[in-house]
């Protein structure tokens, strides 16, 4: 007990090193990272985007960032499985808090998110977004593409999100259409994993449907992603409804017949050679959750995203 401290989110002096809060107590940030708006000498930034006005069915993902931060308390100061390391030993990570959005003025939302993301990316830090519904990926992608050019999208989801978009919609089901039309993603090297609904357009994006994911091993799925994306700059977006509702009931548009969290986490673990420039986890809606199943899955996906980043940083130093 002597080595424990509490409330690392606001008492820590450094942005490196695992926190030692008791799992069940202390101020909640993502993985107990220091809450900070200071971007100097920071390797990665966690940003909450509490927005859910673009959903086609059940709202509630505006509570996703809070739920993911709370669930992330289960990652204590032990080395994080399966990365076998303190992710924060070499990688300086802050929790930047949330984007301030006006619930009565949704047309402003994409610009406000893009503005925050652009500011963070200008510092050179890696950005991990905590949604929010899947619309939030649009302004995040736009900010990343402005810096890196068109990105190969690695998209875990039950839905293609390619519904028609006039460039102005506030819709969580059309951001991929808009990203293709505006040249923000490179459809020929983008891939969607876990799809089990039909949209009218695929823009030539490679799709691994739910039934294909069921037949393939995690290694085979990862191999297909790695071969399709190659060494191009990539953006990783994970809609928690990629998982079967058994593993992620707390989401707005659940679809049966999806993969387990174990299988998709095993796939993510194998994507370390990708040049991932940014990532997000979206659509966690805790009001429909049970026993934090979905929040824990979402927090774990986010931890893996940081784990992959930590390994890449360690290899480059
Ligand atoms: Mn979806």
Image: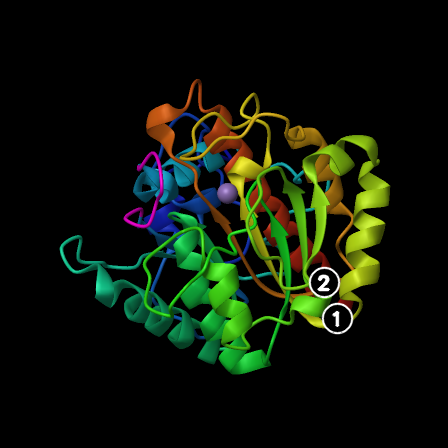
Q: From this view, report whether residue 223 is shown above or below residue 117.
A: above
Question: Magenta segment, which residues?
Answer: 52-59
> Within 8 Å of ligand 1, the CB of disc 2?
no
Task: Indicate the secondary structure of the residue bearing disc 1.
Answer: helix
Give the class, few, some or many, for how many residues have Cα within 10 Å of label 2's Cα (few <14, many ≥20).
Answer: some
Q: From this view, report whether residue 269 is shown above or below residue 286.
A: below
Name the image quarter holding the C terminus.
bottom right
As drawn, is 105 to the left or to the right of 51?
A: left
Displayed quadrant of residue 310: bottom right
As drawn, is 209 to the left or to the right of 216?
A: left
Q: Find out whether the residues at labels 1 and 2 contact each other: C-beta distance under 8 Å.
A: yes
Displayed quadrant of residue 62: top left
**Residue 312 - label:** 2
Residue at left offset 78%, top offset 71%: 231
Can you name the residue that lies furthest to the top here? Answer: 291
> Within 8 Å of ligand 1, the CB of disc 1?
no
Q: Nearer the viewer, residue 78 or 127?
A: 127
Residue at left offset 23%, top offset 67%: 108
Across and down, in percent, residue 214 comes to 76, 31
**Residue 316 - label:** 1
């Amino acid at each position: 007990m002597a080595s424990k401290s509490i409330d690392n989110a606001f008492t820590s002096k450094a942005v490196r090193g695992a926190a030692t809060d008791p799992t069940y107590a202390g101020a909640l940030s993502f993985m107990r990272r220091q809450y900070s708006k200071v971007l100097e000498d920071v390797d990665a930034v966690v940003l909450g985007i509490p927005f859910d006005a673009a959903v086609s069915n059940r709202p509630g993902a505006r509570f996703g960032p809070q739920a993911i931060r709370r669930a992330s308390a289960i990652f204590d100061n032990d080395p994080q499985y399966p990365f076998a390391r303190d992710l924060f030993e070499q990688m300086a990570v802050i929790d930047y808090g949330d984007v301030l959005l006006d619930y009565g003025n949704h047309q402003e939302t994409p610009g406000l998110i893009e503005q925050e993301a652009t500011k963070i990316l200008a510092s050179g830090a890696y950005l991990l977004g905590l949604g929010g519904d899947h619309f939030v990926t649009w302004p995040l992608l736009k900010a990343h593409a402005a810096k890196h050019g068109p990105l190969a999208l690695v998209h875990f989801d039950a839905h293609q999100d390619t519904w028609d978009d006039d460039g102005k919609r506030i819709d969580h089901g059309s951001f991929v259409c808009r990203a293709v039309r505006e040249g923000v993603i490179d459809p020929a090297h983008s891939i969607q994993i876990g799809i089990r609904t039909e949209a009218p357009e695929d823009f030539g994006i490679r799709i691994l449907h739910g039934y294909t994911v069921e037949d393939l091993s995690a290694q085979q799925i990862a191999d297909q992603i790695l071969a399709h994306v190659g060494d191009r700059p990539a953006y990783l977006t994970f809609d928690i409804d990629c998982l079967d509702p058994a593993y992620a009931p707390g989401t707005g548009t659940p679809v049966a017949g999806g993969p387990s969290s174990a299988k998709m986490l095993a796939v993510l673990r194998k994507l370390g050679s990708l040049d991932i420039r940014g990532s997000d986890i979206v659509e966690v809606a805790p009001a429909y959750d049970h026993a934090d199943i979905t929040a824990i899955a979402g927090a774990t996906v986010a931890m893996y995203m940081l784990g992959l980043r930590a390994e890449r940083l360690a290899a480059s130093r």
